[in-house]
Image (spheres, grey):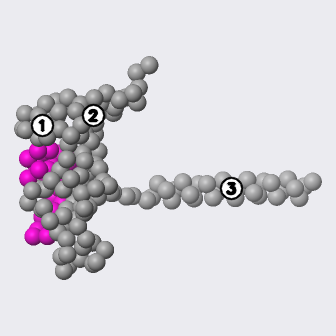
């Protein structure tokens, strides 16, 4: 009986140490995501994101453009295709399908009105969803759908 209690106690201690190690390890991992799009349309993309959406330029050279949101909370990058400085994995251009971006904002109605006044084509008109989102969508010069949304809890 003492052996069984000892084994159970040892197992519990080891499980506790393991769970602390795993949670400590998780806390130490720091990640930052930067989506990148390979496109021939660097000038048009730069104008769209800076003039239309108010993004800033973090870094730019003749083949690469790194932009940040107005509050600098997130970044997105654009790269010319077939650039000799890049490995083959990063050379094929985006084909304009199968990708979207979501931009969460505090005042979706204001941004909707601002973009309409700028003459930006609205792809999906502003609407309320049953799950609480209020959003609309536009497209960037590369054909990427951009969902501009205000997340809200569902009203019951």
Give the mark, 1 or 3, whose residue is nearer the N terminus. Answer: 3
State the CA–CA distance, disc 1 to disc 3: 55 Å
Residue 54 painted magenta:
yes
In the rendered image, the residue lying farthest to the bottom is: 84
Which residue, given by chain and number where applicable, does mark 2 sit on? 135
Q: Is residue 66 above or below residue 72?
A: below
Which residue, given by chain and number where applicable, does mark 1 sit on? 115
Q: Nearer the viewer, mark 2 or mark 3?
A: 2
Q: Is residue 74 above or below residue 123?
A: below
Q: Position of residue 87 (x, y in %)?
A: 27, 78
The residue shown at (45%, 58%) is: 28
Q: Is label 1 in a helix, a strand or a loop? A: helix
Q: Is residue 64 above or below residue 34?
A: below
Give the mark, 2 or 3, whose residue is nearer the N terminus. Answer: 3
> In the rendering, which numbered label is found on residue 15?
3
Q: Is label 3 in a helix, a strand or a loop? A: helix
**Residue nearest the observer in this picture, 11 or 114:** 114
Q: CB atoms at circles 1 and 2 under 8 Å apart?
A: no
**Residue nearest the observer in this picture, 81 or 55:** 81
């Amino acid at each position: 009986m003492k052996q069984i209690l000892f084994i159970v106690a040892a197992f519990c201690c080891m499980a506790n140490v393991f769970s602390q190690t795993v949670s400590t390890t998780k806390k130490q991992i720091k990640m930052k995501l930067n989506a990148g799009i390979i496109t021939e349309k660097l000038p048009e993309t730069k104008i769209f994101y800076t003039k239309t959406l108010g993004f800033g330029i973090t870094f730019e050279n003749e083949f690469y453009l790194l932009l940040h949101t107005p509050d600098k909370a997130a970044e997105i990058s654009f790269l010319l295709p077939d650039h000799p400085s890049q490995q083959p994995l990063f050379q094929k251009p985006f084909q304009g399908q199968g990708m979207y971006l979501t931009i969460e904002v505090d005042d979706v109605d204001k941004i909707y009105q601002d973009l309409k006044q700028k003459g930006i084509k609205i792809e999906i008109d502003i609407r309320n969803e049953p799950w609480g989102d209020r959003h609309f969508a536009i497209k960037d010069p590369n054909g990427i759908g951009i969902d501009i949304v205000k997340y809200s809890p569902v009203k019951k």
